[in-house]
Amino acid sequence: MLAGGGGGCRVSISLHHRHRHSHSLGIYSSTVAHLSSCSWSLNFNPFPYRIHSTTTVSSSSSSSVACSESSESQLRILSTCFSQQEDDHEVPSEGLSSMAGGVVALGKFDALHIGHRELAIQASKVGPPFLLSFIGMAEVLGWEPGPPIVAKCDRKRVLSAWAPYCGNMAPAEFQIEFSSVRHLSPREFVEKLSKDIGVRGVVAGENYRFGYKAAGDAAELVRLCEEYGIGACIINSVMDKNKLSVNINSTNSKDRGQVSSTRVRRALAMGDMKYVSELLGRHHRLILKAKDQDVFTCTNHKLSAPKSCLLNLAPKEGLYDKCCIFIGDKLVQCRVVIDTGHIHVEMDETSTSSSTFGTQDLKLLRIEFGDSIS
């Protein structure tokens, strides 16, 4: 089940609707839906149609996302984050049967960027939204492994933040071992969704490909879903209109400038955190977990951690202002210096005291980047 190029079904009837959200990062969106006979109600008929999303990321928009986190639920997520293993082969214990009767967004959700969020939004218009992706692809296909953009233990927090966009329903995420489904033909894959999992509908991007050797495209997904009585919705890519995107050169012939995980990775490599925030729809959060052989060293106003503690992808080496670090239940403004081997967090004397670190068990660090450019 690979991402790639593809097409979809076009129907002439048009319906304009306005998104129920307006993101504070200045990402504006409008959607034109080409429907056959679907009201996006809970009692819908199979819907072989195409939704055209023209959501864009604009470089001229200003960011006003506050670097803050007041909910006690974040502390619970923190403890969960530390207890979870960063294992790409972990599958939710409740099992795929939890998706029965739900609407499933299909894709590779590495970055959980605004394009992925749009899939969840469309799924939520019909029922409880789910994300279904495949893990272990790099090992099976021989790709060079790399750190994730979102730490595995931080994904639940990100998805919870999508709830206001999704009818106050936080999407649940399920992952399947790629090796267990790689051999399935496009038809067998849709049959598995229908008969084994019992999904009610699927949502995918126009470039989605699936089945053995990525043989199926979006148009075939629509056709097969109709045959098996599953609703199918294909949305156009969310496009990146940032003026800096011209610097994100891609060798992928299918890259027409859409928001993608590859684009986020390259923006992180540029160190432009404002651009990264626009692509993600939130600030990038870096998470470090101390291992037995690693030590977080700290003074009253400075903390350092080796890069070997990183659980996700850091920006390029450099200085980053307007950052935040979460220390227990404290939120501290800071700046971050990244060098070849360490992450250094520097705090103002006025924002820290001699007891800031004294009582903390510094095994897990959460650092959130503002919109400064290194």
Image: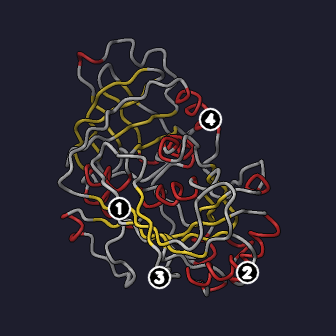
Q: Is residue 374 visible?
A: no
Instruction: Please state which of residues 75 and 4 is positioned toward the viewer in this rendering.
Output: 4
Q: Earlier in the sequence, mark 3 or mark 4?
A: 3
Read off the residue under disc 4. 80
Read off the residue under disc 3. 5
Q: Amino acid at mark 4?
A: Thr
- The label nearer to you, 4 versus 1, is 1
Q: Amino acid at mark 1?
A: Thr
Q: Amino acid at mark 3?
A: Gly
In the image: residue 153, left or right of residue 180: left
Percent x, y for residue 208?
53, 75
Q: Earlier in the sequence, mark 3 or mark 1?
A: 3
C-alpha span from label 3 to label 4:
37 Å
Q: Quadrant of residue 304?
A: top left
Q: What's the residue at 46%, 58% (across, down)?
A: 118
Percent x, y for residue 180?
75, 72
SS category of the residue bearing label 4: helix
- The label nearer to you, 3 versus 1, is 1
C-alpha span from label 2 to label 1:
30 Å
Q: How many C-alpha atoms fall within 10 Å of the one at disc 2: few (<14), some, or many (≥20)?
A: some
Q: Is residue 172 visible?
A: yes
Labelled disc at residue 55: 1
Read off the residue under disc 2. 227
Q: What's the residue at 32%, 57% (across, down)?
A: 268
Q: Earlier in the sequence, mark 2 or mark 1?
A: 1
Instruction: Please state which of residues 103 and 11 is positioned toward the viewer in this rendering.
Output: 11
